């Protein structure tokens, strides 16, 4: 029999993309107000792996990844996704999004994203939100899965998440030390 235990805290991350740089800065500030100070904001990256969002948000989209200093309970992901949905709606125009925010987290073993879309590899978390197992960590690196979005599976993106995972492990070790004192 397995004994239930509370999971380790995880590192909150988010993808933010839009065609408007100033709006992205405003949104990252709003995310900071909700989730605490960022400890990483990526360089500007073209979001050109798909044209899925062009009709709603226009072409020439840019993305930034953000990670947050405070570790979170992984069970908070549905609440976090609902907050990011609200931020998207706040900054929308004429019923269309002007920014897309995809929150998730890095743990020791995986990168999970939150989504409102059901699919075979997306277990239900609650409150209308599903977990999307996006990357798994094995053999000292993150690996994509057959359903991983190409931009998350790209080597440079996975390497960035490997660095964030190292930062997370340091934070987790520090948190564990604090708990033993």
Image: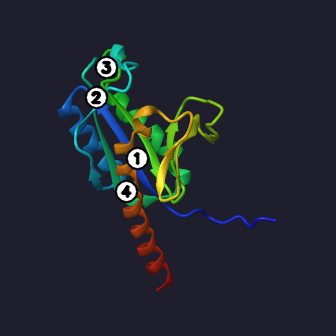
Residue lying farthest to the left in this orientation? 22
Above or below, 15 against 119 in this view is: below
Q: Which mark is residue 158?
A: 1
Q: Secondary structure at mark 2?
A: strand
Cβ–Cβ under 8 Å for marks 3 and 2: yes
For label 4, the residue is 164
Mark 3 falls on what kind of element? helix
Which element is circle 4 on?
helix
Residue sitting nearer the eye, 48 or 174? 48
> Reading the chain from its start, which is encountered first: label 3 or label 4?
3
Q: Residue at x 46, y 54 (%)?
A: 141
Callouts 3 and 1 close, C-beta under 8 Å = no
Is residue 92 positioned above or below 38 on the image? above
Q: CA distance from mark 1 to mark 4?
A: 10 Å
Q: Residue at x 82, y 65 (%)?
A: 1
Instruction: Calculate the distance from the C-alpha at mark 4 to the C-alpha at mark 2.
Output: 23 Å
User: Which of the 4 quarters of the picture holds residue 132?
Assistant: top right
* Among the two numbered marks 3 and 2 on one chain, the one whose residue lies closer to the N terminus: 2
For label 3, the crowd category at 10 Å Cα-Cα, with few meaning under 14, some 14 to 19 and many 20 or more, is many
Q: Which residue corresponds to mark 3?
A: 57
Q: Which residue is mark 2?
A: 18
Of tags 4 and 2, the one toward the viewer is 4
């Amino acid at each position: 029999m397995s004994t239930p235990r509370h999971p380790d805290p995880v590192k909150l991350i988010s993808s933010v993309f839009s065609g408007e740089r100033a709006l992205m800065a405003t949104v990252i500030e709003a995310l900071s107000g909700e989730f605490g100070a960022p400890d990483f904001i990526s360089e500007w990256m073209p979001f050109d792996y798909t044209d899925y969002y062009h009709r709603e948000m226009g072409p020439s989209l840019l993305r930034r990844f953000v990670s947050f200093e405070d570790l979170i309970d992984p069970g908070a992901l549905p609440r976090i996704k609902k907050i990011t949905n609200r931020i998207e709606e706040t900054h929308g125009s004429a019923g269309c999004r002007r920014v897309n925010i995809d929150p998730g987290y890095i743990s020791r073993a995986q990168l999970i994203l939150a989504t409102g879309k059901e699919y075979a590899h997306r277990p239900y978390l609650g409150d209308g939100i599903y977990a999307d197992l996006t990357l798994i960590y094995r053999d000292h690196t993150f690996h994509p899965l057959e359903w991983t979005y190409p931009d998350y599976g790209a080597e440079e993106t996975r390497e960035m998440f490997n660095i964030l995972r190292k930062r997370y492990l340091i934070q987790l070790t520090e948190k564990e030390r604090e708990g033993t004192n």
